[in-house]
Amino acid sequence: MKAGVASPDGVVIKDVEQPKPRPTDILVKVKAIALNRADLGSARGDTSHGSTAGRPVGSEFSGEVVEAGPEAKGFKPGDRVMCHSPGSHAEYAVSDYGRAMLVPDGMTYETAATLPIGLNTLHNALITAGRMKAGESVMVQGASSGVGIIGLQLAKLLGAKFVVGTSTDPARRERLKEFGADLAVSTKDPAWPEQVLKATGGNGVNLTVDMLSGPVVSQTMQCTALLGRIVNIGRLAGMKAEFDFDMHARKRIDYIGVTFRTRTVEEVRDILVKMRTDLWDDVKAGRVRVPVDKTYPLAEARAGHEHMRANKHFGKILLIP
């Protein structure tokens, strides 16, 4: 089969062996692939996100089940599925049954591919790790990404009274309001923490989902409320930075780190079950949506990766096998 695999220069298309499902896996004929920021590192040989040398990169896709293992509960050949699982840049991919969901009736494969990672990551960040309660204020850092756009919508659906989104691009920042942001700010503006504080009556936000980290972290704490929570799910602004420990202590902020990379398969299955319990009616009703910025054939995966690397997209970039 054709697949996008890692090379020192980035993703390249090669012929590789079709994967074989384990007893708890489903084998899927891939119909649409969604790009994620971690794919860029994997495509250049970073194996920390679950990719294996010589095997397809990628982590999010939709398609049709062609084979279901005997322990793949709830799935059978012919089912339309969307999955959050390694190896998506390919004509066929496998997924543990607990990382797959049936595509709702009427939903396209392209739409389905945009949802799994955002739904699972943001429900876990907001509810499980972030302990969000209805009536609280929420900020999503890096909100113009596909995951960020889902975060804005989930915060509203789960009862947030005030939602802040950040983006450094003026046009993308304006569009955040279409997806639930009551206030959109740029972290390049030195006054952005004051803007958030003013909009929240001087209190700051109760919960931040942080995809930036790096040098922005102390400013994020500055506009966090007393006893607020910051859930770190990404490090787009940098892996290391100065940290204001005194502010962290004075405000009694919970700074929480999460990642799927160190979770067991049982933990991931549990995350998906909890998300579906709270959100599946909204997903089926189309109340969670992610715009598709651009679509490429799988053969042009390198161009899709470069478009993401340029950081000019709003929403998701898709590949079609």
Image: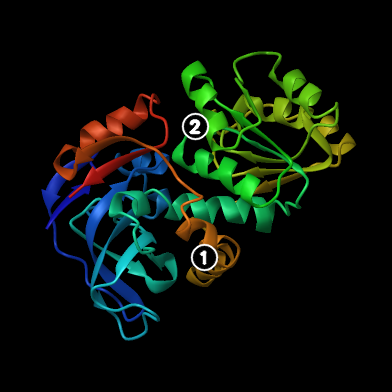
Q: Quadrant of residue 45?
A: top left
Q: Which mark is residue 310?
A: none
Q: Is residue 22 left or right of residue 118?
A: left
Q: Residue at x 21, y 38 (%)?
A: 296
Residues packed near mark 1 inside 10 Å, few (<14), some (14 to 19) or many (20 plus): many
In the rendered view, tell whether residue 228 sits above or below residue 214: below
Q: Which mark is residue 144?
A: 2
Q: Residue at x 54, y 37 (%)?
A: 179
Q: Quadrant of residue 21?
A: bottom left
Quarter of the N terminus within the rendering: bottom left
Q: Is residue 131 visible?
A: yes
Q: Quadrant of residue 217?
A: top right
Q: Which mark is residue 272?
A: 1
Q: Is residue 260 visible?
A: no
Horizontal and vertical percent position of residue 252: 86, 42
| Label 2 close to label 1 by CB (< 8 Å) | no
The one of 215 and 77 positioned closer to us in this rendering: 77
Mark found first going from the N terminus, 2 or 1: 2
Q: Is residue 293 left or right of residue 271?
A: left
The one of 91 and 203 positioned closer to us in this rendering: 203
